[in-house]
Image (spheres, rainbow, N blue to C red):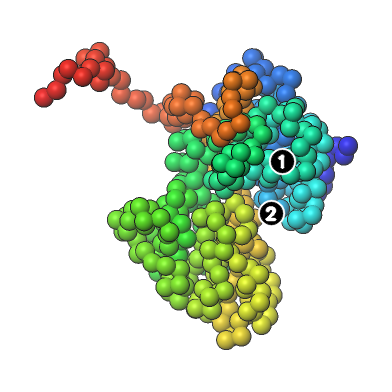
């Protein structure tokens, strides 16, 4: 069994500094870690975490280890690893880590297999790749697995499809569905970090430009909000009539991608679906259009179709590949169509990941305590966990809540009182 596979152990000191910096803004996870250190709710468990290996994730892994779990981690995306953090996890925190920024697809999946060599009893995913591999090729591990957690919209979609088909072999908690996750991580985290990734890669001016956002879920809402705030003219494309109506009433233009294609300067996909931007769209784009993705997998932009219609391509700067079409127009794809916020930037701010990872930690604790009574289904985070995380976060921000009076409590629980 390989103990770890990282870029360079000599990067560990820088990674430790980065981890400690992130921890300053993660008070909810800090409180959970203190509780875990005392109670050891994960004792006896081996937890395989297939997540983005970042400074924020490191603090989650350290918390899980403090809870008594034997923790091993691998990357959930070939471009999202912070190599210094991976080194620090190995050297300073004793966590077997298999992740290298820029790894090939072959290496990416080999790292998942290396993590599975540790024979996990719990899985923790960002995209459900670990669950998928276990169900496809490592079914011998299933009897020893009590449950798992999933943090992304994309992963939850995959897992619910497995549940619907009756092939899911152990319970999963959909951390992504927690209100303290998708309302804040998806909206404020994705909204800020995606534009951060685009700007670091391109240094374009958003003010006065036309930003086309594919998808108006929580991630799309956050992007639209931030884009508008930076002075961009925002267009939204949607397949859901309710979400499209919401985007329209929020003040954004709404139209199909084929109509938005010739108007946009910057295109960002956040749908969780495949081939959202296709060949016919590339052909209509203006010269020097920029295309990026912030959905979990690199399937939202049909890059194979772009390869077919391009006369030439070249890397013009890190994370920017220019495709020159036969017409002479240029289309620039960022970060190979992968998560631009993690590929060319640092991902979500630690202040928002604090809540998401608090849900992961409490989700793992819940699985250990309740797995014997759970079915092979996808479960939402219990409301009491969600509310507790929100309360802790508010307290850390110096915000106090209003309290109901006895009269108000009585009124809300009565059917007899009216006008």
At which x and y percent is residue 316? Answer: 66, 73
Q: Is residue 46 left or right of residue 380?
A: right
At which x and y percent is residue 346? Answer: 61, 49
Which residue is nearer to you in this view: 197 or 23? 197
- The image quadrant that residue 22 belongs to is top right
Q: Residue at x 66, y 77 (%)?
A: 308
At which x and y percent is residue 70? Answer: 75, 26
Q: In this rendering, is residue 150 above or below 370?
A: below
Rounded to the nearest angstrom, the CA distance separating label 1 from label 2 is 25 Å
- The image quadrant that residue 112 belongs to is top right
Q: Residue at x 73, y 40 (%)?
A: 134
Identity of the residue furthest to the left in this view: 419
Residue at the spot of label 1: 135
Q: Residue at x 59, y 57 (%)?
A: 340
- The image quadrant that residue 331 belongs to is bottom right
Q: Residue at x 63, y 68 (%)?
A: 303
Residue at the spot of label 2: 79
Q: Would you call the spot at circle 2 few (<14 residues within 10 Å), some (14-19), or many (20 or more)?
A: many
Q: Is residue 295 left or right of residue 52?
A: left
Q: Earlier in the sequence, mark 1 or mark 2?
A: 2
Residue 329: numbered disc: none
Q: In this rendering, is residue 22 above or below 147?
A: below
The answer to whether residue 284 is seen in the rendering is yes
* Helix, strand or loop for disc 1: helix
The answer to whether residue 197 is seen in the rendering is no
Identity of the residue furthest to the bottom in this view: 327
The mark total stands at 2
Q: Confirm or deny contact between disc 1 and disc 2 (CB under 8 A).
A: no
Q: Quadrant of the N terminus?
A: top right
* Helix, strand or loop for disc 2: loop
At which x and y percent is residue 242? Answer: 35, 52
Q: Is residue 274 left or right of residue 79?
A: left
């Amino acid at each position: 069994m390989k103990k770890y596979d990282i870029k360079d152990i000599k990067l560990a000191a820088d990674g430790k500094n980065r981890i400690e910096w992130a921890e300053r803004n993660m008070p909810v996870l800090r409180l959970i870690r203190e509780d875990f250190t005392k109670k050891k709710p994960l004792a006896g468990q081996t937890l395989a975490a297939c997540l983005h290996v970042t400074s924020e994730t490191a603090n989650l892994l350290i918390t899980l280890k403090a809870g008594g779990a034997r923790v091993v981690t691998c990357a959930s995306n070939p471009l999202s690893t912070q190599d210094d953090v991976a080194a620090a996890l190995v050297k300073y925190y004793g966590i077997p880590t298999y992740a290298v920024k820029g790894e090939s697809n072959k290496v990416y999946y080999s790292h998942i297999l290396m993590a599975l060599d540790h024979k996990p009893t719990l899985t923790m995913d960002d995209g459900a790749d670990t669950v998928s591999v276990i169900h496809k090729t490592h079914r011998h591990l299933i009897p020893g697995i009590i449950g798992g957690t999933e943090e992304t919209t994309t992963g939850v979609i995959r897992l619910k499809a497995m549940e619907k088909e009756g092939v899911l072999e152990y319970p999963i908690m959909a951390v992504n569905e927690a209100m303290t996750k998708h309302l804040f991580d998806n909206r404020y985290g994705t909204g800020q970090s995606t534009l951060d990734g685009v700007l670091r890669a391109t240094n374009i001016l958003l003010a006065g430009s036309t930003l086309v956002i594919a998808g108006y879920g929580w991630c799309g809402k956050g992007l639209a909000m931030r884009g508008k705030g930076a002075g961009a003219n925002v267009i939204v494309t949607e397949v859901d009539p309710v979400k499209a109506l919401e985007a329209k009433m929020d003040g954004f233009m709404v139209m199909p991608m084929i109509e938005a294609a010739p108007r946009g300067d910057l295109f960002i996909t956040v749908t969780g679906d495949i081939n959202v931007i296709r060949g016919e769209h590339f052909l209509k784009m203006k010269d020097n259009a920029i295309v990026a993705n912030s959905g979990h997998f690199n399937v939202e932009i049909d890059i194979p179709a772009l390869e077919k219609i391009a006369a030439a391509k070249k890397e013009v700067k890190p994370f920017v590949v220019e495709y020159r079409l036969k017409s002479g127009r240029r289309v620039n794809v960022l970060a190979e169509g992968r998560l631009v916020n993690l590929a060319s930037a640092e991902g979500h701010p630690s202040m928002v990941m604090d809540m998401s990872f608090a849900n992961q930690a409490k989700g793992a604790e819940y699985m250990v305590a309740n797995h014997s009574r759970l079915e092979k289904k996808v479960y939402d985070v219990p409301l009491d966990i969600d509310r507790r995380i929100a309360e802790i976060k508010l307290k850390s921000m110096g915000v106090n809540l209003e309290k109901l009076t006895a009269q108000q409590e009585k009124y809300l629980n009565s059917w007899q009182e009216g006008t």
